[in-house]
Image (tube, helix red, strand yellow):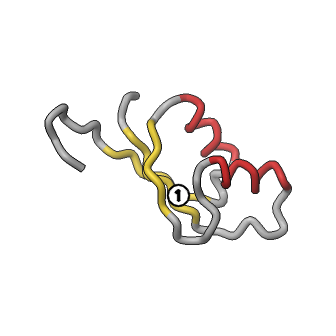
Amino acid sequence: MAGRLRVTQVKSTISHIERNRATIRALGLGRIGRTVELPDNDAVRGMVRQVRFLVTVEELPERAEGEKK
């Protein structure tokens, strides 16, 4: 599981419960269209699962040691 996830917010948090808004903020999102790359671990996957109806997720391949961003 040691890759990365690219998470993009695709829906607004308006009219959603505070817990969902807080999860979106904790993921580093906050506006529709904003994208962040996060480590692929159980904590992040759980957060994404809680707000799966507000975001899209792409799995990115693991980078080699010497490879740049």
Instruction: Find disc 1 in the rendering and name its residue.
Output: 56
Quarter containing the N terminus: top left
User: Element under label 1?
Assistant: strand
Q: Position of residue 50 (x, y in %)?
A: 69, 44
23 above or below 63? below
- Residue 61 in the image, given as x and y percentages of width and height: 29, 41
As drawn, is 19 to the left or to the right of 25?
right
Mark 1 crowdedness (10 Å alpha carbons): few <14, some 14-19, many ≥20: some
State whether residue 18 is above or below residue 61: below
Residue at 39%, 41% in the rendered image: 4
The spot of residue 9 in percent (x, y) is 57, 63
Tell me which residue sits at (52%, 58%) in the image. 56
Residue, x 47% and y 55% (percent of image)?
Answer: 36
Q: Amino acid at mark 1?
A: Thr
| 21 horizontally vs 35: left or right | right
Q: Position of residue 43 (x, y in %)?
A: 59, 31
Residue 58 horizontal side relative to residue 22, left or right = left
Q: Indicate the quadrant where residue 63 lies.
A: top left
